[in-house]
Image (tube, rainbow, N blue to C red):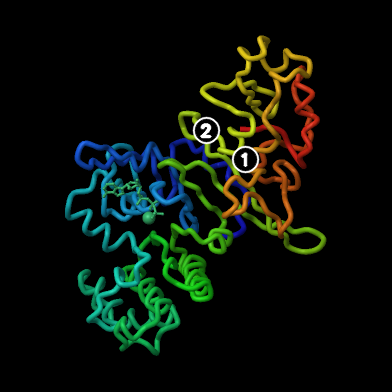
């Protein structure tokens, strides 16, 4: 799934989420603790295509596990809709929900001990979901799955006699037992060292590629989030940015390109990266102007400078436009790497022919009256875009 070519159709479907494996539409989850309300998800939108492998990243407390619990059918949203493999999770009866958890999703948690029963062998753990389902061929299927995860020779071991990485492999086999359409993994490599963690993640990729299972994996590990076609960042309970990666064929061979986008929700709302907000001291309200191929954002400095808006000032400070590029050229959250191409940088609208770049061409001519500072911006690509 590292070769997605365009993300554009995602936002232009006739019906929101039509054909998607996972649809989160304005998802809200509020926890009430005594007199306090914690809004863990505040109108989160997310679409995942069938067969996609998506990484979810975000600061601690941003709502990642809350999202996965809802998608896993373990928790229900306070408002909004979540649809997984055509199951509307808000509409399920109790028994439908139980069946959903057993048949439609497979979950792998961070704590190895949470995934397996300690008194059962690896093979018995894998068989268990099939026992509950009343499947006849479960022994053969368990053997097949342990083979798939590379642990055929550990079938008779109990978890205590398996390493952390092996336990997570068995957990993946357990999650796959009933051939789920979607696999959810919450920090599945969080307790593993980096080598083991890379192995376990390689297995997830193989499951995704060979079985076509749609996988959503929450991770703090940049080495992992950089290997997937799309990484979605959650900030304060909403999807804020998406990094899309693909490979491009150049004369020197294949080149990995990654680009970060801001997520525009269905109501037209956009989260500006903190770095952009701070760089221009944006607060409370901003000026927007529609250009032929982008939207400019300017700070509201009217009162301070006592003059007009963007474009009306011939190069004076108030109309200074936002720096070039869609999102994250300053690598706001460097952990996940804002935009990389084999260690280099692919600017917005630079290079990615046919990609989801915001502007057609670097330095494309914009509408008249554009503040000169915009042109002076010394970045490698397009212009303020949203
Ligand atoms: N059962 C609960 N009761 C009350 N508050 C909760 C509950 N579960 C989560 N929260 C709160 O909701 C917010 C989101 O929590 P969540 O566990 O989804 O974060 P996270 O992104 O998974 O964080 P981490 O990276 O630390 O795992 C946090 O403020 C958390 O304290
Ligand atoms: Mg969590």
In the drawing, what numbered circle is on residue 300? none
Residue 322: x and y, percent?
A: 67, 30
| In this picture, residue 21 sits left or right of residue 327 | left
Q: In this view of the protein, which residue sits in the foreground, 307 or 226? A: 307
Callout 2 secondary element:
loop
Callout 1 secondary element:
loop
Binning the other alpha carbons within 10 Å of mark 2 as few (below 14), some (14 to 19) or many (20 upward) gives: some
Residue 308 versus residue 334 in the image, above or below: above
Q: Earlier in the sequence, mark 1 or mark 2?
A: 2
| Image quarter (top left, top right, bottom left or bottom right) of the C terminus | top right
Residue 239: x and y, percent?
A: 47, 42
Q: For the point 66% across and 50% down, which residue is it? A: 339
Q: For the point 47% across and 50% down, which residue is it? A: 58
Residue 187: x and y, percent?
A: 42, 62
Q: Return the residue found at the far left.
A: 94
Which quadrant holds residue 123?
Answer: bottom left
Residue 61: x and y, percent?
A: 39, 48
Q: What residue did someone put label 1 on? A: 327
Residue 85 seen in the figure: no
Residue 201 versus residue 141 in the image, above or below: above
Q: For the point 70% across and 45% down, which residue is it? A: 354
CA distance for labels 1 and 2: 11 Å
Residue 54 versus residue 90 in the image, above or below: below
In the drawing, what numbered circle is on residue 270? 2
């Amino acid at each position: 799934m590292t070769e997605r070519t365009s993300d554009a159709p995602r936002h232009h479907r006739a019906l929101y989420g039509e054909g998607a494996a996972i649809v989160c539409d304005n998802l809200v989850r509020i926890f009430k603790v005594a007199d306090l309300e914690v809004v863990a998800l505040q109108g989160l939108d997310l679409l995942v295509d069938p067969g996609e492998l998506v990484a979810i990243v975000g600061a601690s407390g941003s709502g990642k596990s809350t999202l996965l619990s809802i998608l896993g059918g373990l928790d229900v949203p306070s408002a909004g809709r979540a649809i997984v493999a055509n199951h509307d999770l808000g509409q399920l009866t109790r028994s439908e929900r139980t069946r959903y958890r057993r048949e439609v999703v497979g979950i792998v948690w961070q704590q190895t001990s949470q995934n397996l029963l300690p008194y059962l062998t690896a093979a018995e753990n894998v068989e268990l979901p099939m026992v509950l389902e009343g499947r006849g061929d479960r022994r053969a299927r368990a053997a097949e799955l342990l083979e798939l995860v590379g642990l055929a020779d550990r079938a008779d071991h109990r978890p205590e006699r398996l390493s952390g990485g092996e336990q997570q492999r068995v957990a993946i086999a357990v999650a796959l037992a009933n051939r789920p359409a979607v696999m959810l993994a919450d920090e599945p490599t969080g307790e593993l060292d980096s080598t083991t963690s890379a192995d376990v993640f390689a297995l997830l990729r193989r499951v995704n590629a060979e079985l076509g299972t749609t996988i959503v994996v929450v991770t703090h590990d940049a080495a992992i989030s950089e290997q997937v076609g799309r990484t979605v960042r959650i900030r304060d309970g909403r999807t804020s940015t998406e990094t899309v990666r693909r490979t491009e064929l150049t004369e020197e061979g294949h080149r990995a390109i990654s680009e970060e986008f801001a997520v525009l929700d269905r109501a037209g709302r956009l989260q500006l990266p903190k770095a952009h907000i701070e760089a221009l001291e944006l607060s409370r309200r901003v000026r927007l102007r529609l250009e032929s191929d982008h939207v400019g954002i300017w700070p509201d400095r009217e009162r301070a400078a006592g003059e007009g808006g963007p474009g009306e000032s011939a190069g004076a400070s108030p109309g200074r436009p936002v720096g070039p590029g869609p999102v994250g050229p300053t690598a706001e959250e460097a952990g996940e790497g804002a935009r990389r191409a084999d260690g280099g940088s692919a600017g917005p609208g630079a290079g990615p022919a046919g990609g989801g770049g915001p502007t057609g061409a670097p330095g494309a001519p914009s509408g008249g009256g554009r503040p000169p500072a915009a042109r002076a911006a010394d970045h490698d690509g397009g212009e303020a875009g949203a």
